[in-house]
Amino acid sequence: MRRGRISLIIAVTALVLGFAVWAAAANWVLLGTRTVAFVTDQDTIWVGAGMGMFNAVKLHVVDTGVNFDRLTIVFGNGETVDEPIRAFIPAGGYTRDIQLPGESRYIKEIIMYYQTQPGSVDRAQVEAWGIRY
């Protein structure tokens, strides 16, 4: 009897934790994608007010690693926030979650600054993700 009760508690706990992880992951929304060619030192992901309001953003590097310097996030009202990244994000990796100042906001665009690779023919697919709390 006691063993069955412990098994039931463990199963319910695992189910609840699994749902919590799924629910947290489900809040992230793909804002846009950009192919980075490394011949310029910046690219822009256009978002727009139609995507909704967000509290945080992060980037996902899909295939080829990118050495990011910083992001400039332009909000719907024209205000900007410069956020230092200063990190190499490998293929499949993410930047840290970047909390946006103030309340939820519309994002007009995200400007990514990164190191160029002169003569490179490599390209990287970068996705911008946003979350609403």
Image: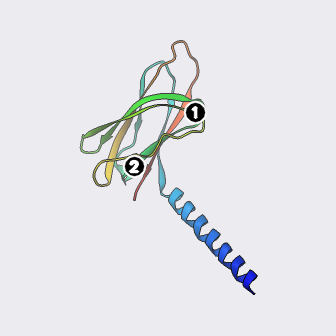
Is 76 drawn above or below residue 35 in the view shown?
below
Residue at the image position 39 percent from the left and 49 percent from the top? 56
Q: Report the quarter where the C terminus lies.
A: bottom left
Mark 1 lies on residue: 90
Specify the amino acid type for callout 2.
Ala
Mark 2 lies on residue: 56
Residue at the image position 30 percent from the left and 43 percent from the top? 75
Residue 110 image offset from top left, x and y in percent: 38, 37
Residue at the image position 24 percent from the left and 40 percent from the top? 78
Assign a secondary structure to mark 2: strand
Residue closest to the eye, 12 or 116? 12
Residue closest to the eye, 61 or 96? 96
- The quarter of the picture where residue 82 lies is top left
22 left or right of 40? right
Residue 25 image offset from top left, x and y in percent: 53, 56
Q: Residues within 10 Å of mark 1 (few under 14, many from 20)?
A: some
Task: Give the farthest residue toward the top.
Answer: 119
Q: Report the quarter where the N terminus lies.
A: bottom right
Residue at the image position 32 percent from the left and 49 percent from the top? 106
- The quarter of the picture where residue 41 lies is top left
Residue 59 image offset from top left, x and y in percent: 48, 40
Numbered tag placed on residue 110 in the rendering? none
Residue 88 image offset from top left, x and y in percent: 52, 30
Is 52 drawn above or below residue 6 in the view shown?
above
Mark 1 to mark 2 CA distance (whole Å): 21 Å
Assign a secondary structure to mark 1: loop
12 left or right of 117? right
